[in-house]
Image (cartoon, rainbow, N blue to C red):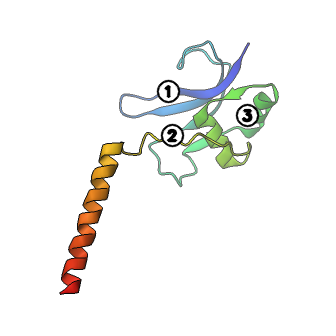
Amino acid sequence: MAIKLRLARGGSKKRPFYRIVAADSRMPRDGRYIEKLGTYNPLLPKDSEDRVKMDMERVQYWLDQGAQTTDRVSRFLEAAGVVEKKERANMKKAEPGKKAQERAEEKAAKAAEAAEAPAEE
């Protein structure tokens, strides 16, 4: 049985609240889980202590048993110092396409010319 440490969503529409759970990887996201390990409330400010709460002893137990973590839960564990930071692929999805980059370069060149022209006079 493959165990995953992952988030199970709760809360109403537009008001998410998550439980950090140990679950069989074949179970649905919000379905049956083995044990509740903590909570995550994304609506709280990032510096709030109550945003992420975990029972570290139980988390460590499940990690020792060979449980895998999802990306979001592994980030919580990295922030808590339980797991060493992983190198993640830096996706280039946010970069503009070739044509947009060319337009930006042309615009920057025109702006540079306009800035130089009054300075020369």
Looking at marks 1 and 2 on the same chain, the residue that comes earlier in the sequence is marked by: 1
- The amino acid marked with disc number 1 is Arg
| Quarter residue 114 falls in | bottom left
- The amino acid marked with disc number 3 is Val
Compared to residue 118, the image places residue 100 above or below, namely above
Distance from the alpha carbon under mark 3 to that under mark 1: 18 Å
Helix, strand or loop for disc 3: helix
Q: Which mark is residue 59?
A: 3
| Quarter residue 26 falls in | top right
- The amino acid marked with disc number 2 is Met
Looking at marks 3 and 1 on the same chain, the residue that comes earlier in the sequence is marked by: 1
Q: Is residue 14 left or right of residue 5?
A: left
Residue at x 36%, y 45% (from the top left corner): 96
Q: Residues within 10 Å of mark 3 (few under 14, many from 20)?
A: many
Distance from the alpha carbon under mark 1 to that under mark 2: 26 Å
Between residue 76 and residue 110, name the one nearer to us. 110
Between residue 69 and residue 21, name the one nearer to us. 69
Count the numbered circles shown.
3
Give coordinates of residue 57: x percent, y percent.
Answer: 77, 37
- Of badges 3 and 2, nearer the viewer stands 2
- Of badges 1 and 2, nearer the viewer stands 2
Q: List the single residue furthest toward the bottom.
A: 121
Q: Which mark is residue 91?
A: 2
Q: Which mark is residue 9?
A: 1
Residue at x 73%, y 39% (from the top left corner): 56
